[in-house]
Image (spheres, helix red, strand yellow):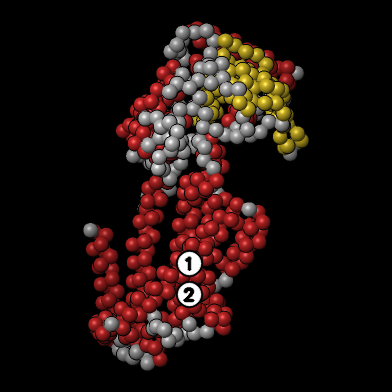
Amino acid sequence: MHLAGRHRSSATEELQVIAPSKLAIEEVSKSFQSASGTVLALDRVSLNVAEGEFVCLVGASGCGKSTLLNIIAGLEKPDSGTVLADGKPVTAPGRDRLVMFQESALFPWLNVFGNVLFPLKLKPNLTNKDRHDVAKYYLELVGLTRFERANIHELSGGMKQRVSLARALAPNPRVLLMDEPFAALDALTREQLYGDIQEIWKARRKTIVFVTHNVREAACLGDRVLIFSPHPGRIQEEFAVKLPRPRDINSVDLAGYATRITKALKSLGKTATG
Amino acid sequence: MKRFLLAAAFFALLLLIWDAAFRARIWSPVLLPSPWQVAIYLKNAAVDGTLVKATVITMRRLLVGYFIGLVVGLPVGLLTARWKLFGDTIGTMALGLQTLPSVCWVPLALLWFGQTEAAMLFVVVMGTLWSVVIATETGVRNVPPIYRRAALTMGSKRLHMWFKVILPAALPFIVSGMKQGWAFAWRSLMAAEIFVTILTGFGLGQLLHYGRELSAMDQVIAIMLVIVVIGLLADKIFFSPIERFLHRRWGTSQA
């Protein structure tokens, strides 16, 4: 079927499109009902993320940082406040803001290639050949070309998260939302992925919001690191990490940043308990 | 190959024991025919066409009824899983009717439809339907929410979500429900055919019944063997490959 007036981009064009985006989060609040009463997960949180920026959110578990990520993704609705992606209000999930989840959310009924192809099949204006080429490109980017026919359960934890990354990148989202994606991995695999993610971020110019409770990880990846305080969830402090990239998680300078951020987190804990 | 030889040796041994029991004349040959008599009956019935005709009639009833059960059961299972109202009403009814042995549908089918093909079909559909409904419902309810959330962010919704995410994710449950439905349908059809003579065609169950009427034990045993073999073939040809695929993909167990 010929779609008159519609532009159809080829795989190469598709891969050349660099689509940075900015996020504006204004006065977002969200509360949940729990057994012990109402919990204010987010209390009038405001945050701006520039185009192509890598922002890390750090905080103890249960401080609302994942809730904020889900609201940006459009998977949850805030009680009040707005989220603007490229100036447009976020009301539902959209392909321009893809989430890479903590636990592997890969589909076990598809093999590796099928998983990466899944979001591409939902993207209009591409031929099937384009979709295959794009999927192959991202599998190569995460170094898993050899495993494209493998079943998901045959992969190691690190490989699974690489496939998740390729799947999230494949439809070329403007914003990548990452919810503790490396929390379940061993240290060696994690360090490898820190290198990979920085390379991919640089090559594809994504805007990334990255949630973690690992301070070093945040200092290694983020242009900015934001500290979240729990009950109610608020952004307490902000650190700009001014280190050249690619950064090595074991470098002394980075350790300096990590120490300062950790101190700030600990003082939060004191005020909360004291 | 070794497994095949062992299995072949096992069945050969069974035949030998049977033959020995026949030769020992512990029971009257009317009650226990020799393996040879059964084999000769099978050969004759195969040559004169009664066996083929009966098998075709039985399989047609079974397959048509099973197919209807699947086609109705799958969407109903989806509805009961998706909407509370359907779950509380149709879901509860399905759960109740599933516990009813499917043979129990035979008297009702006879009174409603008389001695017709429709009665046979009804019994098979009832045997299949409720298992498929329950399995589909359970499968859909057990789909991890994270699949749904991931698919939502990738732009999947409504029909695409159902067909490309929820249904495949529920597949292991649905297949075990299909298998159970098949077993129930097969059993209830045999019961119906033994109880009811239908002029539109003699199935395997009816051959079994007339074997008893004529005290033709070779016929009874031969037909029983055919029924066993059909059940085995259905499992090996249809269900086993699907289950092997599921195990391989999901990594659930190494069969």
Mark 1: few/some/many CA within 10 Å (<14, 14-19, 20+): some
Q: Is residue A252 left or right of residue B33?
A: right
Q: Name the residue type under label 2.
A: Leu
- The quadrant of the image that shows the N terminus of chain A is top left
Residue A201 on image: x %, y %: 45, 19
Q: Quadrant of residue A273?
A: top right
| Residue B36 seen anywhere in this rendered image of the structure | no
- The quadrant of the image that shows the C terminus of chain A is top right
Residue A182 on image: x %, y %: 49, 27
Find out whether the residues at labels 2 and 1 contact each other: C-beta distance under 8 Å. yes
**On screen, A137 above or below B213?**
above
Q: In this view, does B181 lie to the left or right of B82?
A: left
**On screen, B219 above or below A181?**
below
Mark 2: few/some/many CA within 10 Å (<14, 14-19, 20+): many
Please give the residue where the numbered disc 2 appears in the rendered image. B121
Question: Which chain contains the residue that carries disc 1?
Answer: B
Identify the residue at horizontal 52%, vertical 7% (top origin). A242
Please give the residue where the numbered disc 1 appears in the rendered image. B68
- Real-space Cα separation, disc 2 to disc 1, in angstroms: 9 Å
Secondary structure beneath disc 1?
helix
Question: Which chain contains the residue that carries disc 2?
Answer: B
Q: In this view, does A260 lie to the left or right of A105?
A: right
| Residue B100 seen anywhere in this rendered image of the structure | yes
Residue B8 on image: x %, y %: 25, 67
Q: Name the residue type under label 1.
A: Ile
